[in-house]
Amino acid sequence: MSDPTPSAPTEAAPPVGTVTTRLVHRALRGTQEWWRSAVVYVNEPPLLGAVSTMEDVATRARQLRAVSRLGVQAVRIGCPPLPSEAGEDVITGVGDVLTRARRTGLRVVLRIDPHDPRQEACARYWLSRGADGLDLGPVTETEPVSHARYRELHALLAEHARFEDPILSSRLSPAVQSRAAEMLHEDWLHHLVDADLLHLDRPAQLIDSVTESLRIRDALGTTGAWLVPDVLEAGSPDLALASALVVLAMPGAVYLRQGIELGLPVKTSPGADLERTARATALLEEQRGVSGSHFETVRAALRLRTDHRLGLAALAWVEDMGGGPVPETVLAFLSGEMLVIANLGDDGVPLPSDRELLLASGPLTSGSGGTPVLPPSTTAWLWLEPQARERDPRARR
């Protein structure tokens, strides 16, 4: 296992004027386990299960190809059937899906119910055939998972996983967010996905919450894990895309639920929805290859996230920029060499004109003297190209 101890972040050139930052998370250097920075694509229901057919498996195989081109590192599916529950063609088909995922660089995580003995047997079988971890779903107050049960599931991973670094993950809801420290101290999940970034309307509260989440995880050697909001959670299509760019710039893991990359709300109904499937297909055809579309913007963010190692980067909140404090309605932070600015207010925000704009969730406007201006409900990524440090002449040669 690689050393998770963070190293000091490299210095980057500041934007125009004076910038004051507050470092809250240090960068991870060298080779790290895949789960520390992965973007996990979460399949919508219906998930693979005991009654899955060959058509269901074929659908997942087609989806894997699309997901690998999107630029994520893992995909979460359901718990496939056992040999006693399906024909040989279905079992072989699922095995082929796992093999194909591995060849394209994708990890596969199984969604299981931690209280269901049948799904434990399923997890044991498919972990030994190439699955890379178990997702236990949201933490609930009505059916909490005991500490003893978490230990059993960790033992299951250790005993049956075919490949290295299998993971155990779960998700916090706002109602149980306060349990994060207790759960991580007692049970040590690789991913305990936060709901902190579902609503960006109060930047100061978000900064405090994310800072605390990272403090807890850094102390225990695990990683932050964040959920990308959908259009309903964000409040509007523009805010949904702006929020996606905020979350995808964060260090740690990111969970991207199916449909969000197209601007769709998350599907919660358990059954098949042919109308939604047709709509998603049409949106993909409409947006693919179109610069500035929801799909291509998310895809570009995923590519830049990988290229600039943002999942392993340092995080520092920008508190003063351009000679004055960052407005209360603006969220600004440094993720490694990336300056991320989200305008959550009603007025335009001038951007540094001497920095390269790599990505924005919407078109910019122009202010006085041609200064680029970030409109409301828009996020921009600006690259701070690292500058060589000047050698101290007093240093020993």
Image: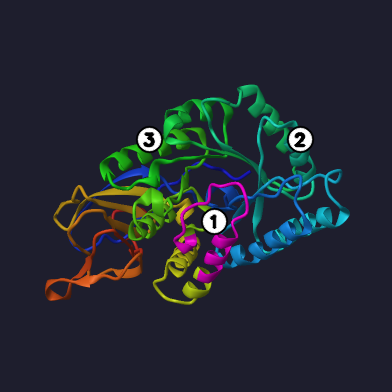
Query: Alpha-carbon distance for marks 1 and 2?
Result: 26 Å
| Comes first in the chain, label 1 or label 2 | 2
Q: Nearer the viewer, residue 164 or 108?
A: 108
| Comes first in the chain, label 2 or label 3 | 2
| CB within 8 Å, label 1 to label 3 | no
- In-image side of 19 versus 94 (left or right): left
Mark 1 sits on what residue? 258
Using a 10 Å C-alpha cutoff, classify the residue at mark 2 as few (fewer than 14 neighbours), some (14 to 19) or many (20 or more): some
Circle 3: residue type: Glu
Mark 2 sits on what residue? 118
Which part of the image, by quadrant, shows the C terminus? bottom left
Indicate the position of residue 18 as horizontal and vertical percent values.
18, 56
Give the magenta part as a residue range: 261-282
Q: Nearer the viewer, residue 343 or 350?
A: 343
Q: Any mark on residue 212, and which? A: 3
Circle 1: residue type: Gln
Q: Nearer the viewer, residue 361 or 341?
A: 361
Could you tell me which secondary element the residue under label 3 belongs to? helix
Indicate the position of residue 254 as horizontal and vertical percent values.
50, 50
Q: Is residue 397 visible?
A: no
**Viewer-nearest of labels 1 and 3?**
1
Which residue occupies 22% across, 71% down? 365
Q: Is residue 39 visible?
A: yes
